Image (cartoon, rainbow, N blue to C red):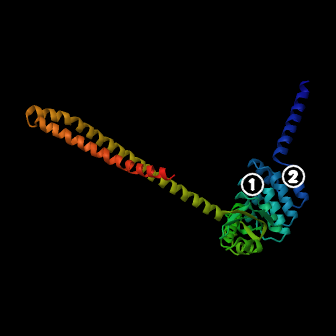
Amino acid sequence: MVQLIGPILVLFLFIVGIAVFLHFVPLGLWISAMAAGVHVGIMTLIGMRLRRVPPAQIVLPLIKANKAGLDVNVNQLEAHYLAGGNVDRVVDALIAAHRAQIPLTFERAAAIDLAGRNVLEAVQMSVNPKVIETPVVSAVAKNGIELKVKARVTVRANIDRLVGGAGEATILARVGEGIVTTVGSADDHKEVLENPDHISRTVLAKGLDAGTAFEILSIDIADVDVGRNIGAELLTDQAEAEKRIAQAKAEERRAMAVAKEQEMKAFTQEMQAKVVEAQAEVPRALAIALREGRMGVMDYYNMNNIMADTEMRETIAKAGPVMAQAPAKADESPKK
């Protein structure tokens, strides 16, 4: 039994050694690379393991690039992986660009990928342009009629401007601005309805793709609808606002008149109160005058006679018009 422990231990250590060796040396990838005609050294694969780089994500794209006739080496792919890039997507983009005869270097493709853009999709868009549909853009002509315009923009990716170039949102915003400007400069909305291609030509001539990652190939007007009469609504709103202002001013004048009337009533009541107060002082003044001898009894009677005579004259004056009409009616009765 003791004699068997030695061979078993040796076998176990041998198996462990093989497992460790196969872990650090992917023989399958090495054989695949050699069969594809790609020279990758064993020490290079071991170095990838030590640098925590999955050998499969480097060797397989390298084989694919070599078969496509691209001049790419292991160090470039490994450096791009360590920088956080997608090696497989970059190689696919290089192959697609090579097949479409689009000049694209590995450095440019890696820079585009590290910038956060999909370099493969950009190459595909360069070969097959993409159509972007704008949302409905509302614009108002000079006659106040609103037009709702929808356009389709055909764009092609510009490889040289993918790094640092603006995206699709900028293209849509610029096209919308161009539509609003073109429709707003039209004297009549019927001109736009008759020639919608005038919008396309005017907007396309503005060079809206400057500073973007795309090249605008064409701008086609998909739909033009007539909206509201904005000019009439503005005039109506303005008239309503002026009406409210006039009503407010009239209400202000009425309130001032009411306040003035109340003030006059208060003043009249105050004067009447003073008159009543003054009249109440008259008997007292008369009594004081009689007591102090400044006024005699005859003077008092004469004053009463004058007041009575004045009241009689006022009564006769008021009754005069009524008595003057009475004989006329009396004269008409016998004639009937």
Q: Residue 29 carries which label?
A: 2
> Residue at 88% of width from left, 63% of height from top?
67
> Is 328 located above or below residue 149 in the figure?
above
Q: How many marks?
A: 2
> Label 1, label 2: how many angstroms apart (C-alpha)?
18 Å
Q: Nearer the viewer, residue 2 or 84?
A: 84
| Residue 196 in view (yes/no) | no
Q: Give residue 315's position: percent from left, percent from top.
A: 31, 44
Q: What residue type is labelled 1?
A: Tyr
Mark 1, secondary structure of its residue = helix
Q: Nearer the viewer, residue 256 or 19?
A: 256
The extreme left residue here reads 293
Mark 2, secondary structure of its residue = helix
Mark with earlier residue (1, 2): 2
> Residue at 89% of width from left, 25% of height from top?
2
Q: Which mark is residue 175?
A: none
Q: Which mark is residue 81?
A: 1
> Residue at 22% of width from left, 41% of height from top?
307
Q: Give residue 8's position: percent from left, percent from top.
A: 89, 31
Q: What residue type is labelled 2?
A: Leu
